[in-house]
Image (tube, helix red, strand yellow):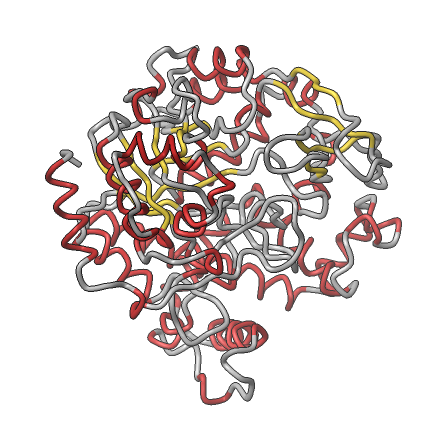
Amino acid sequence: MSNNAASIVSKKRKAGVLLHPTSLPGKLSSGDIGHQAYRYIEFLQSSGFKVWQMLPLGPTHDDKSPYQCLSSHAGNPLLISLDWLQDRHWLERKNINISEQDESYRLACLQSAAENFYQSENTEWKRKLGGFCQDHKHWLDDYALFMALKKQYQNKPWYDWPAKERHRDTKTLANAEKKLKADIQQIIFEQFVFFTQWRELREYAKQHEIELFGDIPIFVARDSAEVWAQRENFLMDDDGNMEFVAGVPPDAFSATGQRWGNPLYNWDYMQSTDFSWWKACFKTQLELFDMIRIDHFRGLQACWQIPCEDETAMNGSWINVPGKELLTALFSTFDHLPLVAEDLGVITDDVIELKKSFNLPGMKVLQFAFDGNNKNPHLPHQQCANDLVYTGTHDNDTTLGWVRNTENYNKKYFNEYLNVQNETAEQDVWSLIRQAMSSVSYLCILPMQDLLMLDSSARMNTPGTIGGNWSWRFDWQQLKPDVTEKILKLMVLYQR
């Protein structure tokens, strides 16, 4: 075990912004990692920020949740910049007869670009593709076949496929690889392009002194390449049936808890392989990010297992997991492992001990602070330098929306604590931004919605709800001219 784990995370005082790339502006159906992402990095630097935090980057299901991805390794092809493909003469957009606002437009462009790429004579790019396939073979082959089979079976989850594909019959899969070669090549091309574009973006961020801060979900989706291909790591039978599923018990977000439905890990098997599955996941994340947040960190101490047939999470129970052994194995494997623990919600002494034993930074959220209890750990005077401070997260309302709904907090205590009286809601938001920036916490993160002073209509996610989430996008016109100037003053004032 390492008692100096957090020394790997730079503790220089700094600030960052939380924004998922899908929320970047643009003409297409969602933001991507093209020109607007580069402009965003320039905006961050010009405003004095040092960190760009985002959500998981994996390919999503139809609900678009980045916490239920089709792969723990792959990048979301819908984030690929089409301009980049056009610049390399692999894409002629005038040949695509679909509205740019339609998601299928981007997919059609990727299809056309892949065809042109494979038909081209450019040996240098083909060599790079070969190197990428070799470096990522441990996940890429399974993922490409998984996605090709999903397409063949009208996007059905793998546990609804025919038995031989479901059970990964060797001869059947070998035949599928031949039959679906074109689709497999398409998927491999998309991943090659995503990782190439991301590497260039990360280099640009580095040149502008911006760290990229990613997020790794604690669980993986039942319908994902890793669960299909490496079932032994999960508590399920060969057909994908589960006795228990993951979630969280009733809390402030939900009176009946949250039944996520993810498979639980077979920790005994994982431990017998020295956590090779987890090591592979973190290897990929370190290729993408400078810092990594472990979502639902308390799931590394104990997980809430819910009987599969239950519709709510109320009848679950806590089951201990070997988180200490896992983190020890990870820190002994990677020379550089800059982790942050998402330790929100009901956190037990055991979870605190696990976090402290690896000296991991945790999170404090000002929207949780003002219940009138002056011992509330989220209050600025209760925070410590080793934590990250947020006004709110992607799971919260925007701070303007939160401030306007006084049922969210003790307004009298809020006014006294911040020394404000009958201010406008916008002024209250700036007071909270100032509190976050002045905190002893070494890293202050502000959601982009708060810098833009947006109301609840700009909320990214409402936990426990289905539909209407993950689709918010901003426009540069929403950025008021004085925001950068205000933020820069706070950066200087509070040494960020």
Quarter holding residue 82: bottom left
Instruction: Tell me the quadrant of the picture where the N terminus can be found.
Output: top left
Q: Is residue 469 above or below residue 310?
A: below
Quarter holding residue 417: top left
Q: Which residue does the image show at 79% across and 63% down from the upper left?
A: 153
Closest to the observer, 381 or 107: 381
Q: Which residue does the image show at 62% across and 46% down from the upper left?
A: 68
Q: Position of residue 148 (x, y in %)?
A: 69, 61
Q: Is residue 321 above or below residue 199?
A: above
Instruction: Tell me the quadrant of the picture where the C terminus can be found.
Output: top left
Q: Position of residue 171 (x, y in %)?
A: 81, 50
Q: Position of residue 19 (x, y in %)?
A: 39, 52
Direction from residue 208 to residue 478 in the image, left or right: right
Direction from residue 113 to residue 442 in the image, left or right: left
Direction from residue 343 to residue 219 in the image, left or right: right
Q: Which residue does the image show at 37% across and 16% down from the upper left?
A: 359
Q: Position of residue 341 (x, y in %)?
A: 45, 27
